[in-house]
Image (spheres, rainbow, N blue to C red):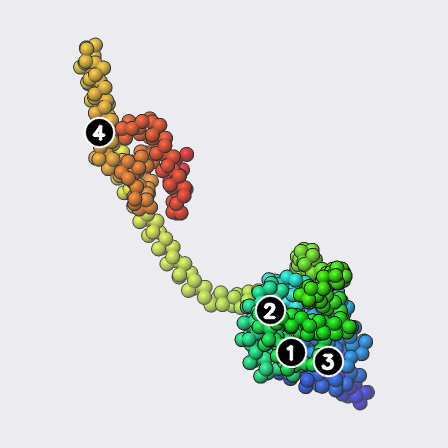
């Protein structure tokens, strides 16, 4: 019996060791994707799939397909592996799913469906940004730049290309940095900013020629020649094309641009030879449109107007076919709406699952800390009680001090209010005495008016104003002092108006104390209220409450 148990344990250990070794190999392959993609592909191809689990097979297939997609390394994959790479990671919300979406986008490109490709890349962009996956996000930005460039949206294309370049430079991907810079050039060309595009090409020429493959150098020099031609340097462009290819082996697209350069160089006969050869070769609808445009310009330059109608009809037909393949601009808004609704709702579900996991971990952590806290509590109890008693004593002292201070302020206010009442009663007594003395005499009205006017003038005197300021400051926590600090540039009359308003006086009384018409007081009050409302001072609302 013990022998059987030992055999089972041995087999289990061997299986576990094999799985662990496979996982380590897959992890090491992913680490070498950046520096040595060819070595990574060879390692994946040499792995024994018989001992792998289904998840390991899917991960191996994903890395193979990803290498073939972003590094353009040929990979010999079975149909089953291809299906694993694009289906096994749906809904996982990991960097593996981002890689799977990138692979799907390239398959959509191969199927000639740019709208579906854009939709997939938008999902990949969102997921990669949420996972802080800079490596995959850089490739997503590059592919989005290409899609929008083909969809005639140069501004968006250039935006994504700049994002891709920033990440590629950060990661140290030299080849992809060059691709991103070329994508920026593509966005500039779509925007018809040929001068800036040429400057960009010339600035990166030495870097491309020093670190790129021969095929990429040919591609770059072809783009440089086109930039030179668009900037009235057609002779230089023609020399570049002569150096990188011959007429018999050139593609229809290159021949069309080469012919246009001859036309710009005032050599329409040479241009016609090249364009006729380009049209005779098999070409795509977009190349057909380019060729017919160049052919139309050549025939127009040669004066063969009788042939222009036919050529114009052919290029219009090619334009409609070409535009039918490029509906990116029309579909962008709809895709953004779907991206906002479907993808974000899916991400919310993912976040909810993460939150549940966080809650479970948090509860466990809290229980652990409660246990530790309970132990520490009994050790620190005496110290906490001592600190608490000291705090209570400090609070009592603070309350005692506050009560004493409030009582002192109350006494000061009472004294000032009593003095103010006394002075106002003296004024009333004086008026009553004057009225009694001149009652039923000829000078009654004149005397009473004079005494009242004298009392009003004295109320608006500097001494009375100071008394009112003291009352306002004492009863409203230095309101007038704060007002003077917040508005130091007010005139004397504006300051008096604010003081009388803070005292609660009516506008009729204020008009008498300031010696101006009541309608002017309404205007001055409105202006002062507007000045306070437009200010950004902290006590603005307190001041405005007196102006309601």
- Front residue of 128/322: it is 322
10 Å neighbourhood of mark 2: few (<14), some, or many (≥20)?
Answer: many
The answer to whether 502 is drawn above or below residue 392 in the figure is above
Q: Is residue 44 visible?
A: yes
Q: Distance between the residues labelled 3 and 4?
A: 108 Å
- Front residue of 536/10: it is 536
Query: Which residue is label 2 attached to?
Result: 230
Query: Which residue is label 4 attached to?
Result: 458
Q: Where is residue 360 in the image (x, y as percent from the top left)?
A: 63, 64
Query: Which residue is label 3 attached to?
Result: 249
The quarter of the rendered structure image containing the C terminus is: top left
Q: Position of residue 231 (x, y in %)?
A: 57, 69
Query: Which residue is label 1 attached to?
Result: 241
The quarter of the rendered structure image containing the N terminus is: bottom right
Element type at marker 2?
A: helix
Q: How far apart are marks 4 and 2 (CA)?
A: 88 Å
The reply to whether discs 4 and 1 touch (Cβ–Cβ < 8 Å) is no
Dot in front, 4 or 1: 1
Q: Position of residue 60 (x, y in %)?
A: 73, 79
Mark 1 / mark 3, whichever is N-terminal: 1
Q: Which residue is drawn at 72% across and 74% down?
A: 273
- Asked if residue 62 lies left or right of residue 537, the reply is right
Q: Can residue 84 be seen in this view?
A: no
Mark 4 / mark 2, whichever is N-terminal: 2
Q: Which residue is drawn at 47% across and 68% down?
A: 379
Element type at marker 1?
A: helix
Mark 4 / mark 1, whichever is N-terminal: 1
């Amino acid at each position: 019996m013990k022998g059987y148990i030992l055999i089972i344990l041995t087999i289990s250990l061997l299986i576990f060791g094999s799985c662990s070794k496979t996982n380590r190999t897959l992890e090491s392959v992913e680490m070498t994707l950046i520096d040595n993609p060819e070595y990574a592909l060879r390692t994946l191809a040499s792995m024994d799939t018989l001992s792998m689990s289904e998840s390991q097979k899917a991960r191996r297939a994903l890395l193979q397909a990803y290498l073939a997609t972003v590094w353009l390394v040929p990979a010999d994959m079975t149909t089953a592996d291809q299906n694993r790479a694009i289906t096994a990671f749906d809904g996982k919300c990991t960097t593996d799913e981002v890689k799977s979406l990138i692979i799907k986008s390239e398959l959509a490109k191969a199927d000639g469906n740019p709208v579906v490709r854009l939709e997939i890349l938008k999902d990949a962009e969102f997921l990669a940004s949420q996972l802080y996956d800079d490596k995959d996000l850089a490739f997503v930005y590059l592919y989005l730049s290409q899609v929008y460039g083909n969809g005639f949206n140069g501004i968006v294309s250039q935006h994504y290309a700049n994002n891709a370049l920033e990440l590629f430079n950060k990661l140290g991907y030299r080849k992809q940095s060059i691709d991103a810079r070329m994508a920026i050039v593509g966005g500039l060309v779509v925007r018809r900013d040929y001068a800036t595009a040429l400057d960009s090409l010339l600035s990166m020429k030495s870097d491309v020629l020093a670190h790129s493959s021969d095929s990429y150098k040919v591609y770059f020099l072809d783009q440089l020649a086109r930039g030179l031609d668009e900037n009235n340097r057609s002779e230089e462009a023609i020399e570049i094309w002569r150096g990188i290819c011959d007429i018999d082996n050139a593609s229809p697209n290159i021949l069309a641009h080469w012919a246009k350069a001859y036309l710009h160089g005032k050599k329409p006969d040479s241009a016609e030879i090249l364009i006729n050869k380009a049209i005779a070769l098999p070409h795509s609808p977009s190349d057909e449109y380019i060729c017919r445009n160049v052919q139309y310009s050549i025939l127009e330059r040669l004066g063969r107007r009788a042939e222009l109608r036919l050529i114009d009809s052919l290029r219009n037909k090619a334009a409609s076919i070409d535009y039918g393949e490029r509906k990116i601009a029309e579909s962008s808004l709809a895709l953004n709406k779907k991206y906002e609704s479907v993808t974000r709702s899916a991400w919310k579900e993912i976040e909810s699952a993460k939150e549940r996991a966080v809650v479970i971990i948090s509860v466990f952590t809290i229980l652990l800390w409660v246990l530790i806290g309970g132990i520490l509590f009994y050790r620190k109890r005496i110290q906490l009680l001592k600190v608490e008693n000291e705090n209570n004593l400090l609070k009592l002292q603070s309350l005692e001090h506050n009560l004493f201070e409030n009582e002192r302020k109350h006494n000061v206010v009472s004294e000032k209010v009593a003095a103010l009442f006394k002075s106002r009663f003296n004024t009333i007594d004086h008026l009553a005495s004057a009225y009694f003395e001149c009652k039923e005499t000829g000078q009654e009205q004149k005397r009473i008016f004079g005494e009242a006017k004298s009392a009003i003038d004295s109320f608006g005197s500097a001494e009375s104003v100071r008394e009112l300021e003291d009352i306002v400051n004492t009863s409203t926590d230095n309101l007038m002092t704060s007002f003077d600090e917040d508005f130091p540039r007010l005139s004397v009359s504006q300051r008096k108006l604010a003081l009388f308003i803070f005292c609660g006086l009516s506008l009729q009384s204020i008009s008498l104390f300031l010696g101006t018409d009541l309608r002017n007081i309404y205007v001055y009050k409105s202006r002062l209220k507007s000045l306070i409302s437009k200010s950004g001072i902290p006590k603005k609302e307190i001041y405005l409450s007196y102006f309601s």
